[in-house]
Image (cartoon, coloured by chain):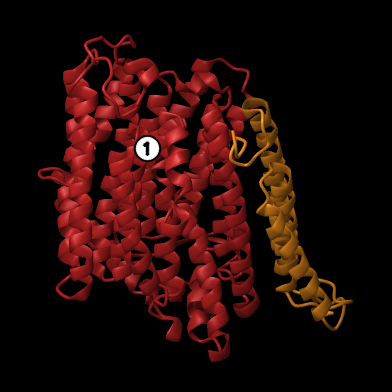
Amino acid sequence: MNHAIILPILIPLLTGALLLTLHRRSKLFKRTLSLLATGALLPVTLWLALLAGDDVLRVYALGDWQPPFGIMLLLDRLSAVMLLLTAVLAGLVALYACAGEDGRAPNFHALFQFQLAGINGAFLTGDLFNLFVFFEILLIASYGLLVYGNGAARARAGMHYVVLNLLGSSFFLIGVGVLYGLLGTLNMADLAARVGSADGDTAPILAAAGFLLLVVFGLKAAILPLYFWLPRTYGAANASVAALFAIMTKVGLYAILRVFTLIFGGEAGELAFFAHDWLWWLALPTLVVAAIGALGARNLQEMISYLLLLSVGTLLAVFALGSQDSIGAGLYYLLHSTLICAGLYLLADLVGRQRGALAGALQVGPGLRQPMLLGALFFIGALSVAGLPPLSGFLGKLLMLRSTGVGGAALQFWPLLLIAGLASIVTLSRAGKQLFWRNNGAMATGPLVDPLRLGVTAAFLLSSLALVVFAAPLQRYLDATAAQLLNLAPYLNIVQGAGA
Amino acid sequence: MEMLFAITLGVLVASGTYLMLRGRIFPVVLGLTLFSYAVNLFLFAMGRLATGAPAVVGKSAEMADPLPQALVLTAIVIGFAMTAFVLVLALRGMGELRTDHVDGQEPNA
């Protein structure tokens, strides 16, 4: 048993607890500790990702209680990729927060670490109830992060976010309860085996439980009827928090992918892939409303939130296709969209700081003090997020479009994705014109961009280039990830091997 | 017993849903609480309802499934913490927004 598997949960959890007990220490101390812990995640997760590359499923049985009886952590390629993405994102965001945003709340770094523990746990766990617990950890930390610092908008958006998610948690418990009541297990691999051999009579109830889980994950991922909280919440959040939250919708997508390819996947008998049609028809309208929302957004953060939503719709659609190519392409796009949206949130903050009272409002205001620098960054981000060559958005979209093959799915997906891309180009160029090109003759009075914030933002936006340069090995890894996800036999063996 | 249990759950869920649809924060929080009670009871019932069956092996001929009890304990603790948090948030919202409407502003304001 490899103990490194639990490190991505333990490091932030212990650091968070330590930061809480030492909360009277100096800011410098807390920053150093937080940065060290977040930085330590990077080599650990990178190593785990390389380790997972040999296609062996690694199980970490907590307390050495063998699955399916104990709680297990499961490291496969998918969880390793998500962990690595989280570590990269969190490391950069923590650096950005250290430039001053953490000053307004004494426990910012503790909350940040707990948030990371929750996110990493959700990616690692192989147990449905544990997934619930880690969801709660990441949620309660996110509630704190969202509303820290004052502001009426934040209190307003925070209330909606909290109440919605509490209701979502209740639904999650009902779904988990039904599955346990009928199948007598909560281990995901064990569930996958038992759904397939379950009584025909129980299938509708199992499907109902599956739909309840879909509602919960859909709320986290912000898919169509459940997305209304997202633009407001993310629009109100602090920049570094919003950037970290770019991974949160992906947690929902990850859970959808995990549950509906493993538990209700190829081995589920008559329930096999039952949700995929629903996912498809939820994803396409999400894509449409996100594009419309982006066109109608009145400030920069809100627009980026809709672009994030656009990526959620896109990803859900390719995951719903469920082929190896489409999931692999989707995962590439997932990496890209998380990093770029996070970068854009930070850039919006940089722009907002210089414009002062106008902040990110999309109207002509005073001229920026560094229009070339910020404009160039915005240009890179816009190219990337809209999916224009030569950056990673283009590559991701190309891979996804190709993976739909020829037929009905392509006929529905291609026009929507391309028109949504056009809509984002229109809204991004309009925003660019209003923010960087035109001004009302006055000069912005905000401070010059400080080098740390600038560096982090640039790193996020330029990661798009890195994703292109390393596209071939990445794509090989992600394709293998998709193949591993769809080949359920090793997952089922985890339980059967131990049970024998 | 199953019937009584089911009716109890139904009443809790119905009252909870009604309260959650109200416009003020306090009824909404109460609604969430009732709803989570119902969910906890439901989760508990997933180990099947029985009387006189301890969740210990070998104490009696029949034993209850201990896992749902453990799950319910976890869920209760989490639900409790979340309710406390919502109340604190609601109080802060009251302080900042000067209203207890869930949208943070009076409907006709």
Q: Nearer the viewer, residue A15 or A245?
A: A245
Q: Residue at x 25, y 52 (%)?
A: A333
* Chain coloured red here: A
Q: Which residue is mark 1?
A: A302
Q: Is residue A16 left or right of residue A75?
A: right
Q: Residue furthest front?
A: B108
Question: Which quadrant of the structure image shows residue A303?
Answer: top left
Report the amino acid beneath label 1: Glu
What colour is chain B? orange
Q: Residues within 10 Å of mark 1 (few under 14, many from 20)?
A: many
Q: Residue furthest right?
A: B52
Does residue A437 appear in this view?
yes
Q: Position of residue A47 (x, y in %)?
A: 34, 47
How many discs mark residues in the rendered view? 1
Q: Position of residue B89 (x, y in %)?
A: 65, 35
Q: Is residue A404 left or right of residue A285?
A: left
Q: Subunit of mark 1?
A: A
